[in-house]
Image (spheres, grey):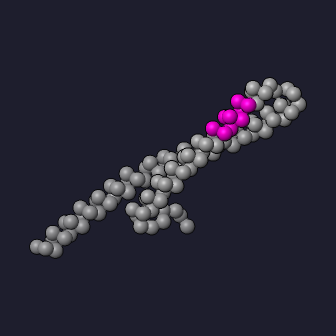
Amino acid sequence: LQLDRLQSEREILMEAIKTSITILYYPLENILQVVRLRAEAQETIGMARSVAEKYFKEGNLPVGEFTTLLMQETKAREEFLKAQSEAKQRAVILEQVCNSSIWLK
């Protein structure tokens, strides 16, 4: 009887663990996609800044427009770093719950 009770408790605990992992996994997957998008946005704005810098040095781009682009680049970098930090935090939590690395080797 005690063995049956322990088996039942084990099954309940295993289901709770599966649920916890699922609850942690999908937001991590989502934020990793956000990190990729933020990295692409940062790269795109960086390329635009390079071109704009050339035009600015030649005197063909107003200071205001160049400054706006620099602010956009800074904001893109900040958003990337925030998303990256959140992804790292979520990954560590998931690894702690799983008690193992979640990354492919």
- Residue 69 figure quarter: top right
Image quarter (top left, top right, bottom left or bottom right) of the C terminus: bottom right
From the top left corner, tell me how far across and down residue 41 is, in percent. 64, 40
Give the residue drawn at x 48%, y 46%: 30
Give the residue drawn at x 74%, y 27%: 65
Farthest-out residue, right = 58
13 left or right of 74 in image: left
Query: With respect to residue 101, does 50 lie above or below?
Result: above
Farthest-out residue, left = 1
- Nearer the observer, 76 or 2: 76
From the top left corner, tell me how far across and down residue 4 is, in percent. 15, 71
Picture mark count: 0
* Magenta stretch, overall SS: helix
- Residue 76 figure quarter: top right
Query: With respect to residue 75, does 63 lie above or below?
Result: above
Image quarter (top left, top right, bottom left or bottom right) of the N terminus: bottom left
Residue 36 visible from this viewpoint = no
**Does the magenta segment cover residue 79?**
no
- Nearer the observer, 100 or 58: 58
69 left or right of 86 in image: right
Provide the residue span drawn in magenta: 67-75
Residue 76 visible from this viewpoint = yes
- Nearer the observer, 99 or 81: 81
- Residue 59 figure quarter: top right
Give the residue drawn at x 41%, y 67%: 99
From the top left corner, tell me how far across and down residue 61 is, in percent. 81, 27
From the top left corner, tell me how far across and down residue 31 is, in percent. 50, 47
Query: With respect to residue 15, does 54 lie above or below?
Result: above
102 left or right of 51 in image: left
Give the residue drawn at x 47%, y 59%: 92
